[in-house]
Image: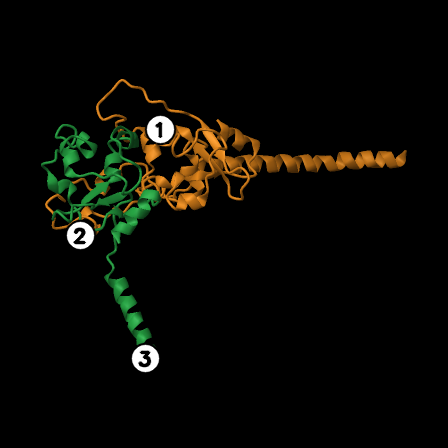
Amino acid sequence: MSALLKQCFLATALLSASLAAPLVQAEYGDVVLNRIASEYGVRPVVFPHWFHRLRFTCNVCHNEKGFKMRAGSNDINMGHIIDGKFCGMCHNGEIAWGAEFCHRCHSGLPGLAGGFYGSQDPAGPAGENYNQRRR
Amino acid sequence: MQSRFVLKHMILKLSKPHTVWFARNLAIGLVLSAVIYSILPVPAYGQWALEDKLQLPLGQPLGNWVPLAKDRVHDPRGPSLVELQEPSEGLSELPPHLSGNRVLWGKALDQGAIGPRRTIYPSKEKFEVLDLDVLMDLFGSMDIVRFPHKIHTQWLACNNCHEELFKSKAGANKITMNNILQGEQCGLCHGSVAFPLTQCQLCHSVERRANKWQMNKAKE
């Protein structure tokens, strides 16, 4: 009897979990950056790759700006951006909107964990630690 | 003597209806093929022939891009959603594809549908576009991989891949699908940003028992 109850409980739990799980429909290549945003009480950053690919080649960010091609391997904070490094090389009010438009980048659902949402997370040496930290 | 005459006579007699039959069928065949080829589009053997073949015969954008407010990543209560560009707005005009962003980025770049900058500020520095195809996995069971340097160097610089990720020497890199599926090697981009790993035929594109014409085409 107890085994049957356990099975029933498990089935309902699985069913409710599958129903409650949010169906993420992010665009392919969308990355959520939430290394420290939630700790400071702001929305996480959503980085759309497609939006940037329309305007710049991969080379601009992944070579000129020094972004490593591995989710979780770029340790960036707002200090860097205001100093004109990483995102701040374009997001300076000259090429793209400046750091005063917080909400345009910090537009994610509050508390969303970092990582790729629309596509596969490139795991690997850096990615593994990153994924562990996410859990 | 008589038998030879009979044989000659028979051949002459038979040959006449045969030539008529042959000529009539040839004429029918020519007319039919002319009709068929005028209706059906002649398959293109250009650079994007394979990609076009893999499309559904709709000819229309296949993307049903989810609005930012409904993608469960952006906060619908956030103040920015009216200011940000919607995916359907930016991507629906580009060459369609079945997977990824539902856009064939390489073709879009090639056709000039998009003109992304190669540097942050306009510079006179010229970027090398290397037109060199590499055939890989020559002894496996899947179709041979054709790696086109051209399309990769249109987006990337040499040092994005060489020498850290891949050595620029033929045969020096042991590339496996296992690594790629784990996000290593090609999988660093393909699967996360570049076209996904469900599109086997876009990489494994040269038939293993390819004829000479295909092999020459791939080598070009």
Q: Residue furthest top?
A: B124
- Say whether disc 2 or disc 3 marks the residue closer to the N-terminus: 3
Pointer 1 chain: B
What's the mark number on residue A133? none
Same subunit: marks 1 and 2: no
The chain letter corresponding to orange is B
Please state the horizontal and vertical placement of residue B25, each as a whole percent of the image. 60, 38
Q: Secondary structure at mark 2?
A: loop
Same subunit: marks 2 and 3: yes
Q: Residues within 10 Å of mark 2 (few under 14, many from 20)?
A: some
Asked if A117 appears above or below B216 in the picture, the reply is below
What's the mark number on residue A2? 3
Residue B199 visible here? no
Query: Relative to residue B203, is residue B70 drawn left or right?
Result: left
Number of numbered callouts drawn: 3
Q: Secondary structure at mark 3?
A: helix
Please state the horizontal and vertical placement of residue A33, each as a whole percent of the image. 21, 44
| Residue found at x 35% / y 33% | B106
Pointer 3 chain: A
What's the mark number on residue A111? 2
The kind of residue tagged 3 is: Ser
Q: Residues within 10 Å of mark 3 (few under 14, many from 20)?
A: few
Please state the horizontal and vertical placement of residue A87, each as a whole percent of the image. 19, 34
Q: Colour of chain A?
A: green
Q: Residues within 10 Å of mark 1 (few under 14, many from 20)?
A: few
Q: Which residue is mark 1?
A: B159
